[in-house]
Amino acid sequence: MQVQKAIETEAETDLIQRFLAGQREIFHDLIRPYERMYYRQAFSILRNQENAEEAVQQAMIGIFTHLSQLTERDKFKQWGLRIVQNEAKMIWKRRRQNLYESIDEGAPDGSGEIATYPKQYADWRDLPSEVMEKREVREAVTRAIGELPEIYREVFMLRDVQQLNLAETMEVLGRNESVVKTRLHRARIMLRESLSPIFAKPERSVWERWKGMNPWFAARR
Amino acid sequence: MVRCKTIIAQLSEYMDGDTSADMRQKIERHLRGCRRCNAVYDSTRKMLIITGDEQVFEVPDGFGDRLHSFVDSMLANSESH
């Protein structure tokens, strides 16, 4: 996997080289591996499809215009995501300024009450992959992530949704290791708390427990 | 036995394979004996499988097409300058 990654990075720096040498149409190939990531990141900030697509488009202009200034070319992924992140935040601010009052729109800023210690200890169900295809499951998870305070949400998105490693996450956010680790830990605890009621195993009723214990009943089934 | 509080505080790093061998052993021993911490660990693990699933965070149909036609017009624009 490491080797695979090295080959991909090499191919990518080569693409960047050719783009900068004037083969402009290569831009399409350069962004293709990341475009879904860009969208998810923008959406997690803006929570609106139209705005998220707009943010990604704006970011494309930024990437296109400034790529020659990227000195560490093996860090195109982090750099691009950072531009997307900034564009999305800019659109978010602009949108908020246009609202008289932000009912339902207020981005949690991390000042609210934060659950940093688990309160729910129910076991979770085993989740077959078909569960993930269910709309209500996807919506519940996206909503719960959306409700995390921003500083926790952005770390969680990068690490546990986009699957960036620790170093990459630090680079996108421009934060040090301990900040990223602490926020990630809190984000996971908070999210687990809010998703627990949805994914917890239902308590077995007295009747079901009796059925399970009674050999006569089990034999008849 | 290590206290639950210590285990919970270390859980995230443990899951990322980021704890010392000594701490890892302590955590694993604790998890075997503590139903509550084990429930937290197991559910967090399941949660991360869910959130890491490509299907969960949807990207709308046609997004890629719209993006690349935007890039096409951006490139065309830059040529004319």
Image (tube, coloured by chain):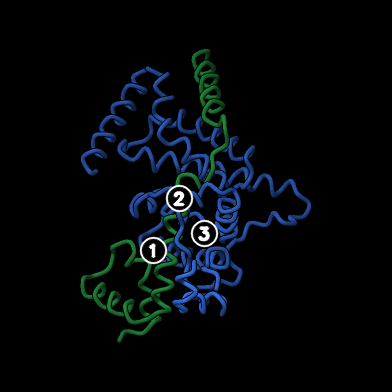
- Relative to residue A118, is residue A180 drawn left or right? left
Residues tagged 3 and 1 counted as in contact (Cβ below 8 A):
no
Residues tagged 2 and 3 counted as in contact (Cβ below 8 A):
no
Image coordinates of residue A71 in percent, x first then y, are: 32, 36
Q: CA distance from mark 3 to mark 1?
A: 12 Å
Please give the label number shown on residue A129.
Answer: 2
Q: Secondary structure at mark 2?
A: helix
Q: CA distance from mark 1 to mark 2?
A: 29 Å
> Residue furthest toward the right?
A100
For the residue marked with disc 1, what is the amino acid? Lys
Q: Secondary structure at mark 3?
A: helix
**Labels 2 and 3 positioned on one and the same chain:** yes
Compared with A103, B31 (above or below) is below
For the residue marked with disc 2, what is the amino acid? Ser
At label 2, counting other C-alpha atoms closer than 10 Å, the crowd grade (few under 14, some 14-19, many 20 or more) is: few
Is tag 3's residue or tag 1's residue first in the polypeptide sequence?
3
Q: Which chain is green?
A: B
Q: Which residue is mark 3?
A: A151
- Relative to residue B28, is residue A27 drawn left or right? right
Please give the label number shown on residue A181.
Answer: 1
Toward the viewer: A71 or A35?
A35
Q: Colour of chain A?
A: blue
Image coordinates of residue B15 in percent, x first then y, are: 34, 64
Is tag 2's residue or tag 3's residue first in the polypeptide sequence?
2
Please give the label number shown on residue B28.
Answer: none
Image coordinates of residue A118 in percent, x first then y, are: 49, 75
